[in-house]
Amino acid sequence: MRFKIYTLVLPVFLLTALSACHDAPEYNNDNFGNFDALWQAVDDHYCFFDEKNIDWKEIGEKYRGLITPEMNSIALFDVCAEMLDELRDGHVNLSASFNTSYYRRWWTDYPQDFNLRTLQEYYLKFDWYSTGGIIYKKLSPSIGYIYYPSFSSGISQTGLDYALALMSDCDVLIFDIRDNGGGLLSNIKTLVGRFISRDITAGFVCHKTGPGHNDFSDPYRIVYSPADADRVKWLKPVIVLTNRSCFSSANDFVATMKGLDGVTVVGARTGGGGGLPFSSELPNGWSVRFSACPIFDRKGNSTEAGIDPDPGCEVHASEGELAVGKDAILDFAIEFAMKTTLLPLPSRR
């Protein structure tokens, strides 16, 4: 990351509009023309070639050699999708009227470390409060618990007030986002605002300034502010629970929370997805979406490959244990919380 830094003043979702514009060649609406248009769009705008050590030219030549003029649309789609899988990126999708490609190995090659039924039956006892996209409950007089399964679910400010007020006499909050595949970046702002008392630099984002693989702007700060003064805040210890299926905005949330004092991340490394998407259309009407704007944590580290739990806090919950009602990650967090209540509360930035 370059040393010169700017403060981000535009909404994050507008950053894809800042991707560099240049004269694009015309492509024929045939198998070779559509393949070439796809390859070129990715070549011009994808942002993780160097980070992942990807030789896109070599990959393009390999898969173009599989194209024939006679192959039907499904066969062409399959070749293009296989090429895109070489990016190893869950944010990459090729969409046609009959299919949407998706790289799944970012999470399928790892243990799940979570079972919703186990949580509901053995820990929440089928008894919890729910509001908007969250469920919450006191696990004990000193430990509060919130589960947020998707950043695509809206969060009610009033609902958050009720949840945090209910647990206001607790000493530790467990915030569980396992299996959260991401969603709206605006929900990060809503949540983080409840855990800080002043503005923070959560991380940085760059955008493409040209078609070269290293044509990026200087970093822009991503700044979050505290919730309004009349909102209920939580400035006591927080334990964030993660697994590999935490992706995209859920991944960004973990990176932000990990940078705060008094926050401990427990579980497995997140799935990554630290790039804002860019979309393009092929001559035949298919659309492609892929990462174009890299996101970095507050220390300037890329978040694309995922966020590790804190030292000594990597925990995995086996399928066998989960099947009989034991969630090793949540158990670890509860034990950690019990120890934490005996310590002075850390400051919160």
Image (cartoon, rainbow, N blue to C red):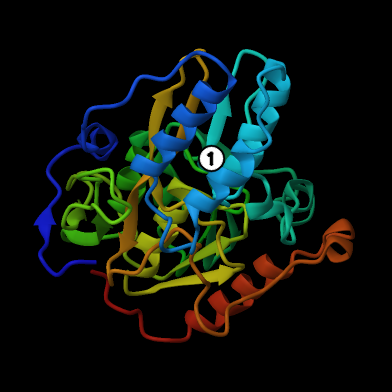
Q: Which residue is mark 1?
A: 150
Q: Residue at x 18, y 56 (%)?
A: 221
Q: Position of residue 193 (x, y in %)?
A: 27, 51
Element on which disc 1 rests: loop
The part of the image, by quadrant, that contains residue 99 is top right
Residue that appears at 35% across and 19% down: 26
> Would you call the spot at circle 1 few (<14 residues within 10 Å), some (14-19), or many (20 or more)?
many
- Tell me: 62 left or right of 252: right
Q: Is residue 78 left or right of residue 344?
A: right
User: Mark 1: which amino acid?
Assistant: Ser
Q: Is residue 45 left or right of residue 285?
A: left
Does residue 244 lie above or below 160 as drawn?
A: below
Image location of residue 301, percent across then percent down: 34, 69
> Measured from the top left, where is residue 331 in percent x and y?
69, 70
Q: Total label count?
A: 1
Residue 150 pos. (x, y %)? 53, 40
Q: Is residue 16 above or below residue 86?
A: above
